[in-house]
Image (cartoon, rainbow, N blue to C red):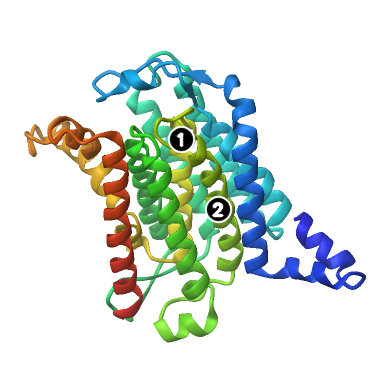
Amino acid sequence: MLAELLAETFGDVWGPLRLLTSITVLSVVGVLFASAASLFLLPKLAHYATRDKGRNFAHGAEASVGKPLGVGIFINLFFAVVVLLVAPINMQVYLCVLGVLAASAVGFADDVKPGGFSELTLGLSDLLLSLFVCVVVLWGQPTVIWLPFTSEQIELPFWAGVAIYTAVIWVSVNALNCNDGVDGLSGMLSLMTLMALGFILYSAVGNTENADYLLIPFNPDAPTWVIVTSIMCGAILGYLWHNAPPSAMLMGDAGSRPIGLFIGICIVVTGNPMIILFVALMILVNGVTGLAKVALIRVFKVRVFKSIAFPLHDHVRRKLEWSNSQVLIRFILLHFVTLAFLVILLLKIR
């Protein structure tokens, strides 16, 4: 908002201010502001967060006891402030940022509450927030989606688009939340996923010529979301400096849930609900597989993967005796390789 106003008001007086109309420049400025805020302000604010009290059944949970927990609330506040300063004026963006802040507030309350909220409470909260941001992004219009490996575009009624994308966002929220448990893991995996989504929004969905060439729907709002995505990446980057193993602070549900929600929002903006399989495969494999296992046991009384503990980062630490650093580096490598390969496939095979 501020950057746009400066460019419009004083751009003719001082030419370099016109650079603030550039997507690339605003994205870089957003990354720098948000990362600097997280890097320098989190240590000063961390004592206002709660303290980790340990988690039942989590491998190595005792190592985190006493550390500041829930600093994700500050990460998302930095994100919101920088969006207001840097991103162009867009009511959809502002309402979605409000949804992200609401998810962070729920997560922070869960971090603070002894024992946390019930699974039902958190699940319903995630569902309502997913529905809210989905309605905001789709905004009552028919939904045109594109799918992998085909040039066909499918037009769905508004309610069908909302139903599909709400489910995708809910999965994104809970998958990333399940990845939180190893220093730096959820932050790095989400950062890489958001960078991939930003690339797709910038080079394909938000570029008229490339969208026509790739036979995908052009979204005129995508460039604005590139800037917003860059700001979230910057906020996560600054946090990762303090979350590198051994971590000094933990973002908790106050960070993982809203970041998962934001990833889901970006997926809606791309217009391809299946893109989550291409940009977040490791997040899904590590997190959603455990959710699926529990659902099968509770609903259908079916037991699968009996010898595998979920999330997978707990399994490899217990069974394969990987250290936290090994889990972090190897999961990053796997995520990078699968991400690069699958995104290339997604964009080139049409």
Residue beneath the point at 89% across and 73% down: 12
Q: Is residue 261 visible?
A: yes
Question: On the rendered image, what quadrant is the N terminus found in?
Answer: bottom right
Viewer-side label of 2, 1:
1
| 315 shown above or below 154 | above
Residue that carries the numbered disc 1 in the rendered image? 243
| 186 shown above or below 154 | above
SS label for mark 2 = helix
Answer left or right for 308 relative to 226. left
Q: Is residue 158 visible?
A: no
Residue beneath the point at 38% across and 59% down: 160
Residue that carries the numbered disc 2 in the rendered image? 136
Residue beneath the point at 78% across and 55% down: 2
Answer left or right for 41 relative to 153. right
Tell me residue 8's x, y (percent): 84, 67
The answer for how far apart the CA atoms under marks 2 and 1 are is 32 Å
- Crowding at dot 1, Cα within 10 Å, few <14 / some 14-19 / many 20+, comes out as many
Tell me residue 18's x, y (percent): 79, 71
SS label for mark 1 = helix
Task: Tell me the kind of residue under disc 1.
Answer: Asn
Q: Are marks 2 and 1 in contact (CB under 8 Å)?
A: no
- Numbered label tally: 2
Residue 34: image tag: none
Question: On the rendered image, what quadrant is the C terminus found in?
Answer: bottom left
Tell me residue 208's x, y (percent): 54, 81
Q: Nearer the viewer, residue 224 or 162?
A: 224
Earlier-in-chain disc, 2 versus 1: 2
Task: Tell me the kind of residue under disc 2.
Answer: Val
